[in-house]
Each structure stands twice: as structure tokens, then as C-alpha cells.
């Protein structure tokens, strides 16, 4: 956690930043490179899970008819996901998926938010593993829901065979299969991953770029301030991306479930 | 003219590749928001109704640019 700070203090920050900057030394055992068991990312995932469980338990512990401030906050998060994502996308059946979407939205939001929270300052989602698992969950869910709703054969017939003239079907069926069963989970994972990855990389470029200019020569040193001002501006942009990507991930999962439940193609 | 190197550019061609990859999604995202602004200007009541589709369209188009980032690092060469 403090490795990067020490490097900055010693004035030997490597510029430009590379993919290696995303592989932080482990916490247990302390400072070991490429240790798989307990890294900052493991810690952040547990912090996110613990925070969400405690937050929702604490706010719902003693629900009132006239909500307290905390209860109102938790209810408005749930209400937003329920009404503006589940019901808007799926229709009245969407209410039963609202708990899943709320969990997904909050989890992605909190893990994304680590990207700009001081001392954390990197999102676990900037490693493909975490978005990939989230995408697999949504993928299994929408296929399972579709198969349960339509039956196995009818679901794949719905998913693969669009209402089109027979002679165009040899072209359309592979495209539909590719886009529904391969591109969907892949793009869901890569979208979240790449946003967080690129966001962290941008912040690294401007932070470390400031140090690089400071250490370069007397003419470039004052310009490092510009670089750090850009970091502040990009942190605000990153805050927008964090919320947007959590929303987009949830909305796309909802739209896939809607597609699986739809009666027409 | 001798064959010595007069000027040299170093770095990754992946950066050029990403620049090219960003053109299409840039235009596409622009079209999405242009259409949304136009539809909202014509029919202000529809703004809430069309908003989820704006974000879905935005996300689907933006994915291409983000694939560019990811593949740029994968095949950085």
C-alpha cells in the first residue's frame, strides 16, 4: 500500500506508468511481489462487502414508517435501482430482480469508488478478474432465467432465430449466436475493466508526469503544477465514470434479462 | 545519400492503433448524444423515457473504444 508513496518520495517514480503499476506488492506476507493470497485488492473486496452488509443492516435495523435519514438514504438507493432500472427495463416482472440489481449496483459502485478514495486509490475492477466474475454471474443469470421461462429449445430458438426470410438465416444465426453468447459477457466485463484501468492509468500519467517534470529541469518544474491540476480535474471525471459504469453495468444486465424474458424476438 | 538514420521515432505502434480505434466510437457517441439532445428539444416530456437507451447505446458504442485500450496493451509489441 505504501510502496508507491515511498517511490514518489525518493524521487525515482518511473514515467511513463506501465501495466506493472497495477500489480501491487502483497500485504500478507508484507511486500512480496506477485504473491497471490492477500493483496490490497483482496482487502478492498472484503472492505466493500463488509461495508455494504453493515450499511444495509444498520439502516434497515429498525425501519420506521416515516424513515430516518439513514433509512431514507438506503431506501432511495434501492428505490432508484428498483424503479429506474428493474421496472423501467424489464417491466412489472422486474421487481423480483431488484435485489440482485441493487447488490450488483452497490458492489460495483463501491469497488469502483476505491479508484479515487485516498489511500485505496486503485479499483479492484482495474484487474479483469473481478469484472469477469461479475459478468459471468449476469451471463449465467440471464441464460438461466430465459431457459426457465421459455424452456431450453424455445429459449435458444428465440435467441438465435430472428424473424427473417429463410435465405438470410445462415448469415444471421452465427451473428446472433456470437453477439448474444460470446460478445455480451465479454463486453460487459471488458467495459468495466477498461474504464477503471484507463482511469487509473490517466491519473498515474498526470501524477507521475508532474513528478517527472519536477525532476527533469528548472524550466519544466513549474509546469508540473499544471499536470497536478489536470489530476484534480480528471479525478472529478473519474467520479462521473465510476457512477456511470456502475449504472451501465446494471442497466445492461437488466436489458439482457429483459431480452431473455421477452416473448417476441 | 547515405543510409544512416536521420530521424527516429520510438514507442509502441499500439498508440497509433488506439488513436485509429477511437475515431469510430468518438463519432458514434457523438451521434448518440446529438440524437438525445435533439429529441429532447423537440419533445421535452420524452427525456426521461429515452435516457436508459441513451446510456445503453453509449455503453455499447464506448465498448469499442475500450476494446482498443485493452487490446492496445495486450498486443503492445
Image (spheres, coloured by chain):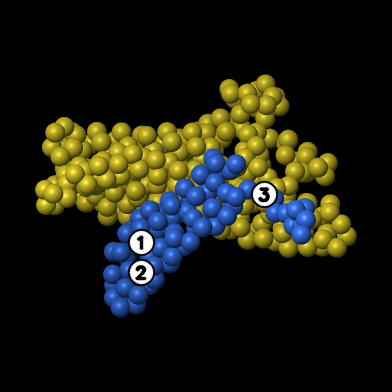
Chain colours: A yellow, B blue
Q: Which label's residue is closer to the chain start, 3 or 2? A: 3
Q: Do the residues labelled 2 and 1 touch (CB within 8 Å)?
A: yes
Tell me the SS state at disc 1. Answer: helix
Q: Residue furthest bottom?
A: B42
Disc 2 with disc 1 on a shared chain: yes
Structural crowding at the residue carrying mark 3, measured as other residues with C-alpha within 10 Å and reported as few (<14), some (14–19) or many (≥20) = few
Residue A186 falls in image quadrant: top left
Judged left or right of residue A197, residue A220 is: right
Q: Is A106 situated above or below B20?
A: above
Figure check: A226 above or below A97? below
x, y (%) of residue A116?
Answer: 60, 48
- Which chain letter matches label 2? B
Residue A163 visible in the snapshot: no
Q: In this view, does A206 lie to the left or right of A62?
A: right
Identify the residue position indicated by label 2 in the image.
B36
* Residue B33 percent across, percent down from the top left: 40, 67
The residue tagged 1 is B54
Residue B27's image quarter? bottom left
Q: Which residue is drawn at 55% across and 41% down?
A: B75
Mark closest to the chain's N terminus, 2 or 1 = 2
Circle 2 — which element?
helix
User: Which residue position holds label 3?
Assistant: B11
**Mark 3 and mark 2: span between their CA atoms?**
39 Å
A26 on left or right of A14: left
Q: Which of A110 and A199 is in front in this view?
A: A199
Amino acid at each position: 500500500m505504501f510502496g508507491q508513496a515511498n517511490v514518489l518520495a525518493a524521487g525515482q517514480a518511473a514515467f511513463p506508468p506501465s501495466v506493472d503499476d497495477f500489480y501491487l506488492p502483497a500485504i500478507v506476507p508484507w511486500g512480496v511481489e506477485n504473491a497471490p493470497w492477500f493483496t490490497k485488492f483482496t482487502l478492498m473486496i472484503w472492505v466493500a462487502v463488509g461495508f455494504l452488509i453493515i450499511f444495509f443492516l444498520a439502516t434497515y435495523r429498525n425501519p420506521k414508517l416515516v424513515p430516518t435519514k439513514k433509512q431514507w438514504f438506503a431506501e432511495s438507493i434501492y428505490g432508484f435501482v428498483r424503479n429506474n432500472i428493474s421496472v423501467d427495463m424489464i417491466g412489472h416482472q422486474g421487481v423480483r430482480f431488484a435485489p440482485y440489481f441493487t447488490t450488483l449496483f452497490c458492489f460495483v459502485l463501491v469497488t469502483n469508488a476505491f479508484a479515487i478514495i485516498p489511500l485505496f486509490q486503485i479499483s479492484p475492477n482495474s484487474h479483469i478478474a473481478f469484472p469477469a466474475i461479475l459478468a459471468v454471474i449476469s451471463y449465467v443469470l440471464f441464460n438461466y432465467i430465459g431457459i426457465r421461462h421459455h424452456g431450453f429449445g424455445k429459449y435458444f430458438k428465440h435467441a438465435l432465430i430472428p424473424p427473417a426470410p429463410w435465405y438470410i438465416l445462415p448469415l444471421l444465426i452465427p451473428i446472433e449466436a456470437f453477439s448474444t453468447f460470446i460478445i455480451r459477457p465479454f463486453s460487459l466485463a471488458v467495459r468495466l475493466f477498461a474504464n477503471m484501468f484507463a482511469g487509473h492509468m490517466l491519473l498515474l500519467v498526470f501524477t507521475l508526469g508532474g513528478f517527472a517534470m519536477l525532476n527533469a529541469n528548472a524550466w519544466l518544474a513549474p509546469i508540473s503544477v499544471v499536470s497536478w491540476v489536470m489530476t484534480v480535474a480528471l479525478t472529478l471525471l473519474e467520479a462521473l465514470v465510476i457512477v456511470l459504469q456502475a449504472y451501465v453495468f446494471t442497466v445492461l444486465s437488466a436489458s439482457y434479462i429483459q431480452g431473455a424474458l421477452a416473448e417476441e424476438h | 545519400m547515405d543510409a544512416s538514420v536521420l530521424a527516429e521515432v520510438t514507442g509502441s505502434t499500439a498508440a497509433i492503433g488506439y488513436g485509429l480505434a477511437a475515431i469510430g466510437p468518438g463519432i458514434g457517441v457523438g451521434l448518440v448524444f446529438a440524437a438525445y439532445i435533439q429529441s429532447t428539444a423537440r419533445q421535452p416530456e420524452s427525456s426521461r423515457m429515452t435516457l436508459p437507451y441513451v446510456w445503453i447505446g453509449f455503453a455499447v458504442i464506448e465498448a469499442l473504444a475500450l476494446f482498443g485500450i485493452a487490446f492496445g496493451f495486450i498486443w503492445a509489441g
